[in-house]
Image (cartoon, rainbow, N blue to C red):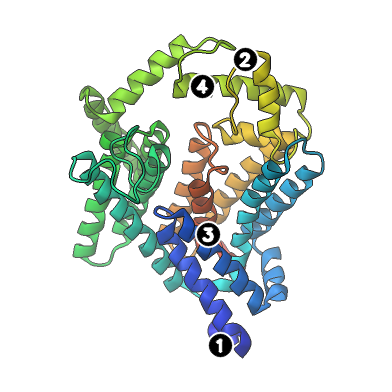
């Protein structure tokens, strides 16, 4: 939507909303407070622009934006029967409401330059996170420095804790690599390629998030297929296998330590029996109890925000510690919204993958499909659309990439 097509009174609010959308990409890896300020700015500016009729018309022609609205509506309906405390229900609604940023982006963004600016801001934030993470890991930055996360559990965390940081850096490495491939100058290609390698190395060697490591491997294989087809896929898989093997062979590497811990914890886990705290054992227990809840409420689930109450009741029977979410997005949606919620999640990923073929640039198609792979795989290891940064990244990147989909009705050859 161009500024010339807007009424005079709507030009400033739309420009403000667009600027906040662009800045949000730089904020997501760094500051939850800034995320909140920018999100409120986006919504208020969009309301002030009063472009609801145009947005409604565009949403009907944009399958991704339409599905985002369906996501929100289904979660609102889930509150009608949720047996949960009001704060838990409102938190669930708040997470679902974030998806409305996708249709709002239709009225906010102007053209491909806005998309590039948004991605540049995200890459700058990822680059800063990566550099500070290396410095902290090396001991240059003290573990108790203000404004950064506590390094007691993981020596390399900066603005986010280890799981979220590793996921952000994994996708950041992919974004760097995609933009390096699309770069038009040798210097830009070199700089972006180096950033991609450094971010990937941080995930495999320095970071402590297993889910991020798995996501990185999947994204690397997909990148190889995107660049070189079948040969590229085979080459990428071979390279990842070699790098992962080398990292695993180094006992001090994060990959080695996390792999050994995963295997030993999984072997020691006993269903329904409380043991010493362990991420793998706890997750397996959360999965077990989630499946039991789904079996008891298969059709419509326990309602939006109802997971915590349902899990507390079940955990109390075995005197086990309860959890707020099952660390698995598929199970979370199945527990709260039943089979319909699970199907909607899968459809959401499938529609984004399919509609990515209609995006104007091959790099944008790759970024959209890489996002789907990240969340489809990552959702097995954590509740990707329940945590703040992960939810906002998914919604923001989807909004940025698909804002103009309604204007492109024909697939790219």
Q: Residue furthest bottom?
A: 8
Label for residue 36?
A: 3
Residue 289 picture quarter? top right
Labels 4 and 3: the sequence-earlier one: 3
Q: Secondary structure at mark 1?
A: helix
Which residue is labeled 1 in the image?
4
Give the numbered dot on residue 319.
2
Q: Residue 282 — which label?
A: 4
The residue mark sitting in front, 2 or 1, is 2
Answer yes or no: is residue 408 visible: no
Badge 2: few (under 14), some or many (20 or more) residues near its Cα, within 10 Å?
Answer: few
**Between 222 and 340, the one nearer to me in the picture:** 340
Quote the CA–CA distance across marks 3 and 1.
Answer: 30 Å
Report x, y in % for residue 213: 36, 35
Q: CA distance from mark 2 to mark 1?
A: 64 Å
CB under 8 Å between discs 4 and 3: no
Q: Earlier in the sequence, mark 2 or mark 4?
A: 4
Q: Earlier in the sequence, mark 4 or mark 1?
A: 1
Q: Is residue 412 left or right of residue 346?
A: left
């Amino acid at each position: 939507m161009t500024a010339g097509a807007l009424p005079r009174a709507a030009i400033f609010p739309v420009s403000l909303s667009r600027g906040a959308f662009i800045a949000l990409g730089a904020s997501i890896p760094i500051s939850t407070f800034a995320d909140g300020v920018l999100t409120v700015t986006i919504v208020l500016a969009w309301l002030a622009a009063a472009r609801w009729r145009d947005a409604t018309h565009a949403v009907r022609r944009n399958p991704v934006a339409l599905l985002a609205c369906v996501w929100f509506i289904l979660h609102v309906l889930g509150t009608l029967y949720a047996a949960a405390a009001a704060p838990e229900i409102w938190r669930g609604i708040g997470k679902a409401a974030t998806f409305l940023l996708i249709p709002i982006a239709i009225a906010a963004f102007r053209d491909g330059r806005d998309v590039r600016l948004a991605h540049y801001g995200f890459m700058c934030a990822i680059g800063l996170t990566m550099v500070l993470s290396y410095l902290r890991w090396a001991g240059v930055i003290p573990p108790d420095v203000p404004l950064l996360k506590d390094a007691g559990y993981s020596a390399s965390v900066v603005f986010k804790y280890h799981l979220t940081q590793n996921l952000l850096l994994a996708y950041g490495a992919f974004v760097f690599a995609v933009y390096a491939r699309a770069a038009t100058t040798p210097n830009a290609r070199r700089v972006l390629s180096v950033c991609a390698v450094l971010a990937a190395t941080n995930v495999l060697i320095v970071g402590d998030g297993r889910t991020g490591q798995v996501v990185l491997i999947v994204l690397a294989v997909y990148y190889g297929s995107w660049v070189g087809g079948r040969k590229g896929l085979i080459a990428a898989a071979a390279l990842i296998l070699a790098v992962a093997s080398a990292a695993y062979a180094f006992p001090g590497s994060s990959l080695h330590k996390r792999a050994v811990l995963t295997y030993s914890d999984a072997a020691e886990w006993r269903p329904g029996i409380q043991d010493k705290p362990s991420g793998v054992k706890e997750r397996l227990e959360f999965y077990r109890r989630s499946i039991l809840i789904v079996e008891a409420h298969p059709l419509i689930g326990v309602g939006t925000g109802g997971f915590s109450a349902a899990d507390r009741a079940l955990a109390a029977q075995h005197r086990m510690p309860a959890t707020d979410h099952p660390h698995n997005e598929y199970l979370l949606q199945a527990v709260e919204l039943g089979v319909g919620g699970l199907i909607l999640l899968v459809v959401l990923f499938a529609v984004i993958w399919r509609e990515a073929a209609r995006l104007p640039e091959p790099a944008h198609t790759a970024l959209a499909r890489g996002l789907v792979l990240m969340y489809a795989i990552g959702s097995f290891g954590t509740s990707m659309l329940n945590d703040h940064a992960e939810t906002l990244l998914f919604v923001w990147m989807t909004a940025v990439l698909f804002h103009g989909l309604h204007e492109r009705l024909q697939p790219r050859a």
